[in-house]
Image (cartoon, grey):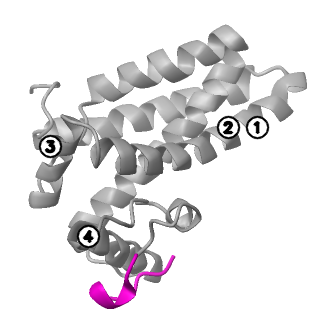
Amino acid sequence: MNFLTIEQSKAAYWADFAIYGSMIVVLAIALVVGTPHALWPRVAFLGITGVVGWSVLEYLVHRFLFHGVQPFRRWHAEHHARPTAFICAPTLVTASVLGTFLFLPAWLMGDAWSACALTLGVLCGYVAYATTHHAIHHWRAKGAWLRRRQRWHFIHHHAQRPCCYGVTSGIWDTACRSARPNRKSTAGKASD
C-alpha cells in the first residue's frame, strides 16, 4: 500500500474513511466526556464553525487549487478523466495538513478543547464530502438529494465553462456566481 500516490488502492481508499471515521468518534467521545461544562457553548460553537468552515474550504480548494494550481490541477484532471478510479489525496497528506494548519494553530491560540472541537467539525464536513463524492460516482441514487448532487456534479465534469464546484452543496457556487453559467448549454436540471 503506497500512502503517497494520488490513485489509491481499494485498501488505502477505504482506509481514509476508517481513519477519519475513527478520529471523529475519538474526538467526539473526548469532548463529551472531558470538556468542562463552562466550555460547552464555545466547544459547540467551534464544532459548528468547523463544519461551516469545511464547506467554504471544500469550495475554495476545488475551485482555485484543483482547477487552478499545478500539480493539483493535473492530478484533479485525472479524476475528471476517470471519475470512478480511486483518485484522492493520500490520508497521510490530508492528516498532516489538518494537523499542521488546523489543530495545532487552534490549540496554540486557544486550548485543547477548542482545537478538538474545531477539528471535529472540519472532519465531519470532510467525511460528509468524501462520502457524498463517492456516492456521486459509485452509487445508484435512490433519493432526490443524491440525484440532484449527481446531476450537479455531472455538470461540473462536463460543462464547457468550469462551474458547480461544490460537491456537498451548491450554496457557495450560488454565492460566488459559479453555478451553471449557461443553463441551455448543460444537460439535466441541477438545483440544490
Q: How far separated are the C-alphas under marks 4 and 1?
A: 33 Å
Q: Amino acid at mark 2?
A: Gly
Name the residue tied to disc 3: 74
Mark 2 vs mark 4: in front: 2
Point out which mark residue 44 bears.
1
Magenta part of the chain: 181-192
Q: Tell whether label 2 touches label 1 (CB within 8 Å).
A: yes
Q: Identify which residue, 168 or 25, lies in the foreground.
A: 168
Determine whether the residue tagged by mark 4 lies in a helix, strand or loop: loop
Q: Is residue 101 above or below residue 22?
A: above
Mark 3 vs mark 2: in front: 3
Judge from the rendering whether residue 118 lies leftward or rightward of residue 55; answer left or right: right
The quadrant in which residue 28 appears is top right
Q: Identify the main secondary structure in magenta.
A: loop
Mark 3 vs mark 1: in front: 3
Dot 4 or dot 3: first in sequence order is 3
Q: Is residue 50 above or below residue 135?
A: above
